[in-house]
Image (spheres, coloured by chain):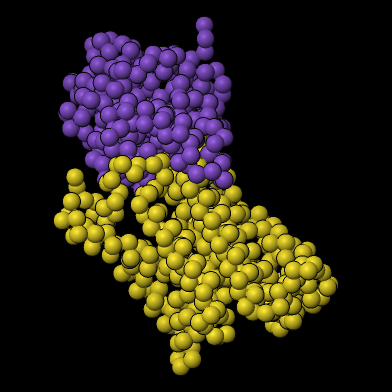
Chain colours: A purple, B yellow
Amino acid sequence: MSPAAIEVEQLVKAFGGLRAVAGVSLAVSAGERRVLIGPNGAGKTTLFHCITGTLKPTLGRVSLFGQEVTNFEEYRRTQLGMGRTFQISNVFTELTLLENLALAIIGTDRRKWIMHRQVEGFGAVREEALQGLEAVGLADRAAETAQHISYGERRQLELALALRSNPRVLLLDEPCAGLSPSERQSISKMIAALPRTLTVLMIEHDMDVALGLADRVTVLHRGDVIMEGTPDEVQADPKVREVYFGHA
Amino acid sequence: MHIPACGHAELLDTSTAGIGRIRVIERNQIVVAVVALAVALALPHYAGPFWMGLVTQMFIFGLLALSVDLLLGHTGLFSLCHASFFAVAAYTTAILQVRYGVSTAIAAPAGVIAGTLLALVFGIAVRTRGVYFILITIALGFIVWGVAYRWSSFTGGDNGVTNVPFPSVGSFAITSHLQYYYFVLAVVVFCAIGYRVLVNSPFGLGLRGIKASETRMRSLGYRTGLHLYVAFVLSGALASLAGVLYVYYNRFVNPVTGSFQISVEAALMAIVGGTGTIVGPFIGSGIVLGLRNWVSSFFELHAAVMGAVFIATVLWAPGGLVGLARRFRARTSGIGKGNE
């Protein structure tokens, strides 16, 4: 069997005395759509940051496709095929949409070090950038600076950025946070349409979105995994209902 | 079509869409540059020695301000140690040329190299951000000033190094301030073109990306610390080049050249003129030097006037004079087009 796309072993992240993540193990196989759910403070985002490399875990290991990356900085994980989005929209607001995409495209290769040629001379980058915008429905706004597009469009741009660094693993931190119901639907459609060669790990609060997209769901509570299974199994589990859905 | 809050009506013209920035504005920049170059070439026919000296200095300090702005305007790092590279380059060239009789062909490049080597060391400052970066660069700058001031057996202490000759390489010799003016102008034009290519390159775009969001850049595969370090060293090299030009103009160098005040003034020039532009630092340099010359002729506390200019710029023209001009043009052209 090929190694898991993302494997987390006995991961602990402590902030002083608080163990935000208290010994989590999980394995996401290649091509899977996994959704992380859990009430506020469950440690979802902390776990996520340990996988992306934003935070260094206190204990435990993180591997991508069988390679241990626990001590890799974020840029190296990206070069290994990791793409991510942020919970709070994080795009280059001062740059045009095309420039945003261009940065994502050249970020994983040597072209980012070229100093003697103008960006505009890279026709292939421009083409690829336009394709990337097209894929999220923003092609007609290519020349706008990102500060002039709506919040929903920024979420789309965010997704386009993560996808253009050619990831094999995509980590999405609440891609639908703060969106209107119709925007939510269009983002979930985009995520559902992603090719199966891509592995997706996603944090999502919206149950309809989460359960609609997931192959499997992992439920976190107080830094621990309390349940893992298919959406149906998770919904039927009494323990999950108790901590998450609030039923007695 | 909505009008963005900050102006730039041209921005919305998608027909000029490039990966680069706003093409229309860039075209205007070229027009400005050509006009400025024509004026600069013709200037010696109209201006006397005093003004020629001032304009030569404006170019040299403009280059220093431009080097500061590679960090300030394109990466967001506020360096207050650029006088160090400027001074180390000036001292190296002066000492080699005056004390050891080394020719310009070696002394001038050696100055640039010495300043750049220092930038390779001081580049560790990019491990910090924000106010810590400012504090570290101030501290590093004071080291150089202290060495220049105290190590008098080597640097000449307070008196510095005097009697630096005009540069000459083989049969190419500069013999007058007028010739030197044209030489400086040529170097400035060459540097401005190179700078423009650099900031519009993929590397330059990367720097603007880091300024906008460093966390996002990391997640896209950029080793942002290394990017900033390279920018810091390039910036230090440019400041060193300005230092060599300065020492051949000024004919002497002393610790003031490497002082905190020069670092501050260089940043002030970039801010007053307009950060993130090429003409801005030169305009700022002209304003700061002109004001200092003019005000100090009748008012002892000219530094206070500088402070007031700085405060006024930050409060009312955060984009500097270039930003002010752009805003003005965007407003008038917006009215002209009947608000689109």
Residue occupying image coordinates x 41% and y 60%: B31
Residue occupying image coordinates x 78% and y 72%: B97
* Residue B205 visible within the image: yes
Horizontal side of residue B88 vs A91, given as left or right: right
The x and y percentages for residue A235 are 24, 14
Q: How many marks?
A: 0
Residue occupying image coordinates x 26% and y 53%: B9
Check the image and report above or below for B214 versus B240: above
Horizontal side of residue B164 vs B40, given as left or right: right
Please tell me in which quadrant of the rendered image residue B329 appears: bottom left
Find the residue positioned furthest to the top: A1
Foreground of the two, A63 or B227: B227
* Residue A239 visible within the image: no
Find the residue positioned furthest to the bottom: B298
Foreground of the two, A66 or B254: B254
Horizontal side of residue A139 vs B169, given as left or right: left
The x and y percentages for residue A13 are 46, 33
Please tell me in which quadrant of the rendered image residue A21 appears: top left
Quadrant occupied by the C terminus of chain A: top left
The x and y percentages for residue A49 are 43, 33
Please tell me in which quadrant of the rendered image residue B318 appears: bottom left
Residue occupying image coordinates x 17% and y 28%: A182
Check the image and report above or below for B218 versus B310: above
The x and y percentages for residue B249 are 65, 76
